[in-house]
Amino acid sequence: MAKSVLSKATKTVLEAISTLKVAIYIRVSTHWQVDKDSLPVQRRDLISYCKLVLGTDSYVVFEDPGYSAKNFERPDFQRMMARIRAGEFSHVLVWKLDRISRNLLDFTTLYEELQDLGVTFVSKNEQFDTSTAIGEAMMKIILVFAELERKTTSERVSAIMLSRASDGKWNGGRVPFGYDYDKDEKQFIINEAEARVVKLIYDLYDEKHSLLAVSKELNERGYQSRRGVPWSPVTVGNLMRNPFYIGTFRYNYRDESHKTFGFKPESDWIMCEDHHPQIVTHDQWNRVVGLMRSQRRGQPGSGKSFNRGNTHIFAGLLTCGYCGSIMRASQDRPRKNGWRPSIYSCSRKRTHNDCPNKYISDTTIGPFVLNYIANIIKARKSFGVSTSIDTLQKKLLRGDTFQDVLCIGRPGLEELYRHFKGTSDYTQNFMASSGETSHSEEQERDILLVEKRRKERALNRLKALYLYSEDEEAISETDYILERKKLIDSLESIDTRLAEIDDALSQRLKLTDEEFIEKASYFIMAQQLTDKRHIDYERFIQTVDPKIVKDFVNSVCSNFCIKSGRVVSIRFKNGIEHQFFYRGEE
């Protein structure tokens, strides 16, 4: 059998495809840094390293002078990553690890992406190359100690700041509204103009007993916060609860582990009374704070016991389809049977009245969400090889609840359809437990994906060199076809194996309806999910603990977008989003 002999020019072209190309990244924290970490020193050392150690003259230098490594919001770093994702580079070279990141979590995410892209990370000073096992291990050890140093420094700084606060010294930060800070005298002084607004806020609340009414009154009178934005009920409430206005300096009360505002135990607080001039009297402050506490939902009034009769099931999950604001929950009027559903309205509309969105009630969103999830379960149970995507959509929109829905957005519908066919890239269904997966198969899958991307880049570069080379003799058509076939055959082989692994993994991740019902038995009765064509939400919600329903919804869904009193999209925990289009919409 005759063997194909590649021309010298063809070999040169194929060698060029596999040639290393290095992205050199350099950074300093200030524009004036001129010591051993300076940009010229980094640039010179790394270019030499490219030539002498990596053995290539093919490199591009990216530099970010005056940018911190606390995050990746750096212009040249972002440009470098865009070109890496386009398959242009085989290596990333830095002078030191902290030039690219000082955060363990951020770097881990970056490193995983580089691995997926088949790009090698090299640090010149730490002398590790992640293309080798020992280099990868050394990098991880260095990252652990770098993170330890950062946390140790943070703890040391925190101890110093606590000591200063105990002595009544201010550690900096935002000066409370109504005050100025004299840096020379190191003390707070009253800002008379703002102090008048502070006094007005307390007086208005004394009169109206409503944060919403106070914020509206302030906005109607033309008062703005220090940032120049209108007042909101939350801002007004936080201001009035602050003991700073009775001359008390409070420190170490905020729980930073909370994503939202949380408090530490009062035993951890540092309180310094008579620290600075007060704006309101102790009597008024105590009266106002006590009144707010008694009116807060979930808090008992004076001499009263409180038994919460309502749980806002969808609170925290709804956003306005017009302005993007969070939709706040409140209680609707009681029904004849005693049930009192929640209503959700745009927070911006409540404070500014400039958003056209309508409120939505549990009576609307509850049936929509539960019946849609039930339809997904039933559709999965009856899904077969002959099921079309249009048939799937009909099954998902079955029932009177969805009679006004014209269709489901195609991208989300197709993603669910692929998942049902067992070809989804998602490792976990939004209603599936993680299950047990083969570690070796997952490792093989990761390796194959890296190899696939390398082959795809090689194929693209081969095609570009053949089609756009100015030298007509660079590669013959025959040699191009032969090499292209080798790469395509290799890719097909990889895809076949990936499909086998994905199928094996998906089989482990699939849940039968019985398994799902067992997992969700605390939430929805089996017959309501599988037997009944429609879930009567109002009747159902009065037979189960609403907190169980809330926990279930939060475990399945991450967001609902509401527009004109309708659900226009549901985003599930795994990232799949289903959009809904209604009849009569423009």
Image (tube, rainbow, N blue to C red):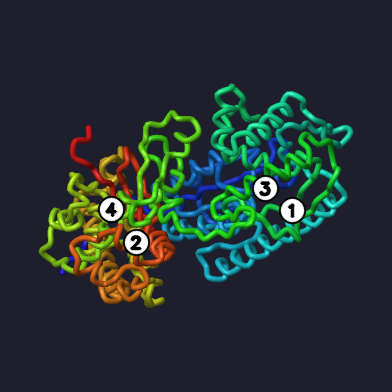
Please tell me whether mark 1 or mark 2 is closer to you in this view: 2
Task: Using the numbered discs, state the Cα–Cα distance from disc 2 to disc 3 in whole angstroms.
Answer: 34 Å
State which tag comes first along the sequence, 1 or 2.
1
State which tag comes first along the sequence, 2 or 3.
3
Q: Position of residue 46 (x, y in %)?
A: 60, 49
State which tag comes first along the sequence, 4 or 2.
4
Task: Using the numbered discs, state the Cα–Cα distance from disc 4 to disc 3 in whole angstroms.
Answer: 40 Å
* Three-letter amino acid code of the residue under disc 4: Phe
Q: Position of residue 103 (x, y in %)?
A: 61, 55
Task: Using the numbered discs, state the Cα–Cα distance from disc 1 to disc 3 in whole angstroms.
Answer: 22 Å
| Secondary structure beneath label 2 | helix
Task: Using the numbered discs, state the Cα–Cα distance from disc 4 to disc 2 in whole angstroms.
Answer: 14 Å
Q: Which mark is residue 431?
A: none
Crowding near the residue tagged with mark 2, few <14, some 14–19, many ≥20 C-alpha atoms within 10 Å:
some
* Residue located farthest toward the top when viewing the structure as drawn: 222
Residue 501 visible in the shown view: no
Task: Using the numbered discs, state the Cα–Cα distance from disc 4 to disc 1 in whole angstroms.
Answer: 44 Å
Q: Residue 572 is drawn in which quadrant?
A: bottom left
Q: What residue is pinned by disc 2?
A: 541
Q: What residue is pinned by disc 1?
A: 252
State which tag comes first along the sequence, 4 or 3.
3
Viewer-proximal residue among 24 and 5: 24
Image vertical order of residue 298 relative to residue 404, above or below = below
Please tell me whether mark 4 or mark 3 is closer to you in this view: 3
